[in-house]
Amino acid sequence: MRQSKTLNTLAAAVALALTAGAAQANNGFKVGDTEVTYGGFIKLDMMYNETSDGEISNFVGRDFYVPSLTPVSANGSSTSRFDAHARQSRFFFGTSTDLGNGEKMVGRLEFDMMTSNNLNDERTTNGYSPVIRHAFVTYKNWTVGQTWSNFMDLQSLPDTLDFVGNADAAVFIRQAQVRYTSGNFSIALENPESTVTKFETTTRFTTDDNATPDLTVGYNFKTESASFRLGGLLRQIAIDGVYDGVNYDDTITSYGVSFSGKFNFANKNDIRFTLNHGKGLGRYVGLNTINGAVLTGTTNAAELEAIDVTTFSVAYRHLWNDKWRSTFLYSMLSADNEVAFTGTDATKATHSYSANALYQFNPKFMMGLEYKFANREVESGLDGDMHRIQFSAKYDF
């Protein structure tokens, strides 16, 4: 209800400003000392999926690639499914307020419907609620609110039709934070969350028992033809409460490092890469394919054991001419599970590769076709494949 009121208020402000003849910004309007801009895009996604070992059980995994949801089964059979949605469409409002002393405050409020969990009736309305992507303000060196994690590098994300693209390897997190930036260096305190594997099962406990924020740092540097980012993560993984009837109480320290970048060529082609490694990276990579830690038993004496993870991806983008472009992508994740604790059903590794052909009709409208292959292997040695063909059309406004 609060979200709906916010949207109604913003919509009313837009209508009032336009009908009252308010001063216009380049792509918005001005109210007092604040310039308000708005924009977004409309995107259609149509996907044909074929899996080797049964059904993708979660709707999210059918809307975009989630490595942990590729089915693996000893008795599974090949399954084919077709889906279409416009849930990735998004809109935003930006603000820039003149403080009268040569300084400005900048804000952003952005929504989409991609991960909305109210599954409406696909027989008739296909309605989904907007969900917050970004809600933050920037003043001088400070950024406060919800936005991309400071541990993440946006420039390394590939040019794909899939929502993430290199989901096996990517750091892909939006969360509340306080960030300080000075030159090429940034440091942030971010919202903590722990994901813990129950002993010898695939059950996940999302504990929210942390007593300290996650600490992230980043450093950007450039050469004449490339740009790079170094990232660091230090956080606590905690469980403190009753889960499945057992009162657990333990904390461990987790850390991670990231190196990513983009090489630019004279013909506007580029290579983008990311390499991440850490002890207990958990939800920060692979869309939480691997949890941060595993419990060593099923009694209140059980402790947490961090799970080591390494991820890597590389993508080559080629511009065929001023209309056509393609991206060729490989992405992988590898976990070092302690099988005595996780059991043999735990995900050991995932990898995927994809290729696409995108046609840019004009600066505002694009259509494209993409093929993706994905594989997930568990510790028992079983694995499962997914083949996906995706068509998308996108209009930016």
Image (cartoon, helix red, strand yellow):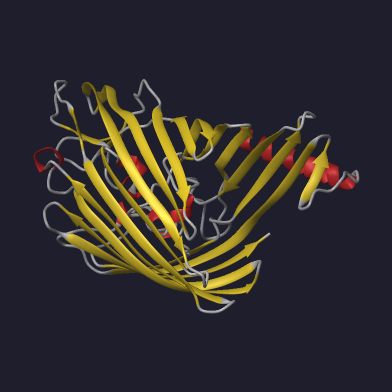
Of the pair 384 and 324, the residue shown nearer to us = 324
Give the x, y percent position of residue 346.
Answer: 19, 47
Question: Looking at this rendering, what residue extends furthest in the bottom direction?
Answer: 321
Give the x, y percent position of residue 48.
Answer: 40, 70
Please state if 329 lies on the left or on the right of 70 as rendered: right
Using the image, determine if residue 202 lies above or below residue 325. above
Please state if 367 lies on the left or on the right of 251 as rendered: right
Give the x, y percent position of residue 263.
Answer: 44, 61
Give the x, y percent position of residue 73.
Answer: 19, 59
**Visible in this render: residue 1?**
no
* Quarter of the C terminus within the rendering: bottom right
Residue plotted at (78% across, 52% down): 26
Residue plotted at (84% across, 42% down): 16
Question: Looking at this rendering, what residue extends furthest in the right direction?
Answer: 21
Question: Looking at this rendering, what residue extends furthest in the front direction?
Answer: 224
**Visible in this render: residue 248?**
yes
How many labels were placed on the picture?
0
* Quarter of the N terminus within the rendering: top right
Residue plotted at (67% across, 37% down): 106
Residue plotted at (18% across, 60% down): 383
Of the pair 385 and 235, the residue shown nearer to us = 235
